[in-house]
Amino acid sequence: SIYLFLGMTMSGISSGSQPILGYNYRAKKHGRVLETLKVSIIAAVGVGSIITITTLLFPNFFINLFNDGNQEILRIGSRGIRIYFLLIPLNCFYIIGTNFFQYINNAMKSVVLNLLRQVLLFIPLLFILPKYFGIDGVWMVFLTSDVIIFIITRYFLKKHVKNV
């Protein structure tokens, strides 16, 4: 699936930055830590942006990879994939941010961000948004939780950078 490809790419970017971040953080080379974080975020958001643009331009192609020609699945899936992947670069930012906190020995922030997105935001939104937006509301759960967690992750990162 597209999201699996994205996840593997984010894992690669994140894992590639881990030894650089961990080593330089412990060596108190904060400039190198911030530069590595910046490059990781740019790479992740760049990949996420390419995937977003591709899925927005060619949703039918991706749906038809898993569809046997059912027009209803194509109609619903094409709309859903556009909603789901619209703000995926924000999700990429969140992934790099949560891993960053883990790599610099601040796992609690990483855990809080992950629990917040996957439990405290996602589950309530899953009950609320479909009531108002139907099937689109299911897709919008991802979008909404990604926007909120992006804002919170960005806040935590800015606060960390300010205190360095």
Image: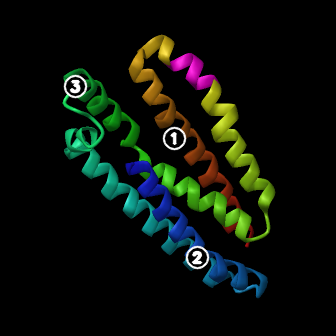
Whichever of callouts 1 and 3 sits on the residue coming sooner in the sequence is: 3
Q: Quick check: 99 above or below 39?
A: above
Q: Is residue 111 left or right of residue 73?
A: right
Say whether residue 126 is magenta. Answer: yes
Residue 125 percent across, percent down from the top left: 58, 25
SS under mark 3: loop
- Give, as a three-letter code, the residue at label 3: Asn
The image's mark for residue 147 is 1
Q: Quadrant of residue 57?
A: top left
Screen quadrant of the C terminus? bottom right
Task: Find the magenta span and give its range.
Answer: 124-129
Whichever of callouts 2 and 1 sits on the residue coming sooner in the sequence is: 2
User: What residue lies at 33% left-to-right and 54% top-to-bottom?
Assistant: 51
Q: Kindly identify which residue carries mark 3.
A: 70
2 vs 1, front mark: 2
Q: Is residue 24 left or right of residue 137?
A: right
